[in-house]
Image (tube, grey):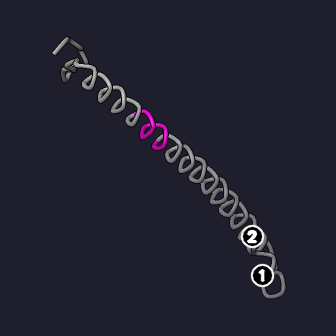
Amino acid sequence: SSDGTREHWEGAAAEAARRQAGSVAAAAAALARQLIAASVAATDGAEQLAAARSDVLDVLERARRDGLAVAEDGSVTRA
């Protein structure tokens, strides 16, 4: 906080600097909140992708166990 500067610095320049410092601090806090939200979204997305991958691999294994062949493009035929 720039409030502690009031004991040492007065005048129009001091007030302008304090306002500018307040604006910079507010912008930094907003950016930090956005980065935290992006981090949460990325983590959630990674968890969802991992779960989907696991589901696909399970289905693939069951299909093969049931005697089906699964091609790279996802097409399925009897083996």
Cα separation between marks 2 and 1: 8 Å
Magenta highlight range: 46-52
| Residue shown at the point (78%, 81%) measured from the top left | 5
Q: Residue at point 39% right, 37% down?
A: 54
Amino acid at circle 1: Thr
Which image quarter is the N terminus in? bottom right
The secondary structure making up most of the magenta span is helix
Neighbours of disc 1 within 10 Å: few (<14), some (14-19), many (20+): few
Q: Nearer the viewer, residue 5 or 60?
A: 60
Q: Is residue 41 left or right of residue 54?
A: right
Question: Measured from the top left, where is residue 14 in percent x and y?
Answer: 76, 75
Instruction: Tell which of 28 and 36 is nearer to you.
Output: 36
Residue 44, position as x, y percentages in the image: 53, 43
The residue at 74%/67% (across/down) is 16
Residue indicated by mark 1: 5
User: What residue sits right under mark 2 in the picture?
Assistant: 18
Residue displayed at 35% across by 26% down = 59
Circle 2 — which element? helix
